[in-house]
Image (spheres, rainbow, N blue to C red):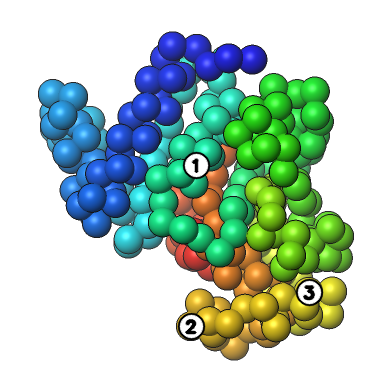
């Protein structure tokens, strides 16, 4: 499945924006400059002003009509993002969805080698792609320090699964013997959350400094949602 012309334009705009982020060291200035280059007004009567959800973290919203292929655009964006950003410890992605139904649908598509989403990822990352559910990550299934340094690790999660206000969400913040090997690997304690065991899943994900994709992001604007995003250390 090939990108359509308008989808290619979206990816090209994303690539230019990230180039400007690196050059200007300011997501907000990069946003203003991008639209200035395209002769598009920012502010009243034009594009919305930059929304600084997490200070210092580039924030991009792709608005696509129903049936426009937003999930395919998201999958196709990852190589562009990793190519543009400074060298990371590993290539990791947190893919957040608003409901269990969408969670199941998205994970199945990303796990299926015959699905266009997964085929795009396999092409872009040389077939080295591992998709994790929260349960698989908590149990350390195919999830080790050596594995994450050699692949694209993609965690498909629901919003509620990491919100600390939910019982299910709190599991990710608890001591986890299955992930003890990561505690020896994480050599920068400044990255970790205070008052949280270093073997907790949230600590491992934080250390990976992931790209975070938020499906239907208008559902993730509450204070609890922003706290959740901060905890991922995107």
Locate residue 28, reporting x and y percent. Answer: 23, 49
**Going by the image, does 148 lie left or right of 21?**
right
Front-most of residues 154 and 187: 187
Separation of residues labelled 1 and 3 (CA atoms) = 30 Å
Instruction: Give me the residue at 19% from left, 48% from top.
Output: 29
- Label 2 neighbour load within 10 Å: few <14, some 14-19, many 20+: few
Q: Which residue in the structure is indicated by mark 3?
A: 179
Residue at point 58%, 70% (across, down):
207
Of 209 and 55, nearer the camera is 209
Task: Return the disc, 2 or 1, that comes first in the chain's sequence.
Answer: 2
Q: Secondary structure at mark 1?
A: helix
Q: Which residue is mark 2?
A: 190
Residue at 66 percent of width and 48 percent of height: 152
In the image shown, does 51 or 211 lie closer to the viewer? 211
Q: Could you tell me residue 60's position as x and y percent?
A: 39, 41
Report the front residue among 117 and 184. 184
Q: Position of residue 213 (x, y in %)?
A: 54, 44
The tag earlier along the polypeptide, 2 or 3, is 3
**Quarter of the figure with the N terminus:** top right
């Amino acid at each position: 499945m090939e990108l359509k012309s308008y989808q290619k334009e979206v990816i090209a705009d994303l690539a230019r924006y990230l180039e400007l982020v690196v050059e200007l060291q300011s997501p907000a200035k990069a946003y203003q400059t991008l639209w200035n280059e395209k002769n598009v007004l920012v502010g009243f009567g034009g594009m919305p002003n930059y929304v600084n959800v997490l200070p210092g973290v580039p924030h991009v919203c792709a608005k696509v009509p129903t049936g426009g292929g937003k999930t395919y655009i998201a999958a196709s964006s990852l190589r562009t993002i990793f190519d543009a950003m400074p060298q990371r410890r590993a290539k990791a992605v947190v893919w957040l969805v608003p409901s269990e139904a969408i969670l199941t649908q998205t994970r199945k598509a990303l796990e299926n080698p015959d699905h266009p989403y997964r085929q795009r990822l396999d092409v872009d990352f040389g077939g080295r792609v591992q998709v994790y559910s929260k349960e698989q990550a908590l149990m350390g299934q195919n999830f080790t320090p050596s594995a994450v340094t050699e692949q694209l690790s993609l965690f498909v999660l629901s919003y509620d699964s990491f919100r600390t206000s939910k019982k299910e969400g709190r599991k990710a913040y608890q001591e986890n013997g299955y992930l003890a090997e990561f505690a020896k690997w994480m050599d920068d304690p400044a990255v970790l959350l205070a008052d949280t065991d270093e073997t907790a899943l949230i600590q491992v994900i934080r250390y990976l400094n992931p790209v975070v994709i938020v499906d239907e992001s208008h559902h993730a604007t509450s204070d609890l949602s922003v706290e959740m995003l901060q905890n991922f250390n995107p």
